[in-house]
Amino acid sequence: AVVSTQSTGSGTVCDDLFSTLSATIICKSMNFTCSMGWEHGLDWPDVQNKYDIHLDDVSCGPGNKTFADCSYKTENNCGHSEDVFISCVNDCSITFSLIDSNGTVSTNGQGLLIANHSSLNKTGTVCDDGMTDVTATVLCN
């Protein structure tokens, strides 16, 4: 992400303390509806190296509604390999389906969980990191 501040101009954001919630709040500040994720890296070195790193330790909590509510530091201990890249979208809807062992839609309510995000034109499986019985219940209802 490239940020612009009145006093120092534009610069990149370091991934220290950065979170999905931080990405969502920043996307909303740019008039998108939500974030579909974020990552860090030195993906565009020719572009990234044109900027200084302006923000570090960006932390937005559940009570934060705007970026102004979040905390951050303007001094950093980062390299450009820690620059944040965000995917912001306006269609945040994801649909789910179950696929059986034959690769067809399950009719018995059991199978491989598939997620489809139409605005990103992506369909794929769902990782179990953070998955709980409560999550499964919400998806099935």
Image: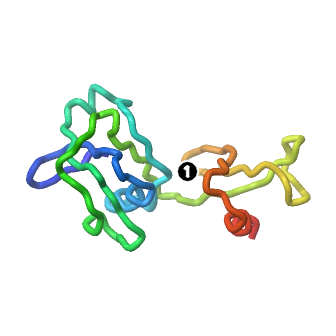
The image shows residue 21, relative to residue 115, as above or below, that is below
In the picture, residue 12 is in which quadrant? top left
Residue name at image x 23 percent, y 49 percent: 55
For this view, does 102 lie left or right of residue 44?
Answer: right
The image shows residue 137, relative to residue 5, as above or below, that is below
Q: Which one is in front, 21 or 56?
A: 56
Q: Position of residue 122 (x, y in %)?
A: 61, 44
Name the residue at the bottom extreme.
63
Query: Which residue is disc 1 drawn over?
Result: 119
For this view, does 83 lie left or right of residue 5?
Answer: right
Residue name at image x 30 percent, y 55 percent: 58
Q: Which one is in front, 117 or 46?
A: 46
For the C terminus, the image quarter is bottom right
Q: Residues within 10 Å of mark 1 (few under 14, many from 20)?
A: few
Residue name at image x 91 percent, y 59 percent: 108
Name the residue at the top extreme.
46
Residue name at image x 25 percent, y 57 percent: 72
In the picture, residue 140 is in which quadrant? bottom right
For this view, does 141 lie left or right of residue 105?
Answer: left
Q: Position of residue 112 (x, y in %)?
A: 79, 48
Q: Secondary structure under badge 1?
A: helix
Q: Which amino acid, by three-letter code, is at mark 1?
A: Ser
Q: Which one is in front, 16 or 123?
A: 16
Q: Position of residue 31 (x, y in %)?
A: 35, 61
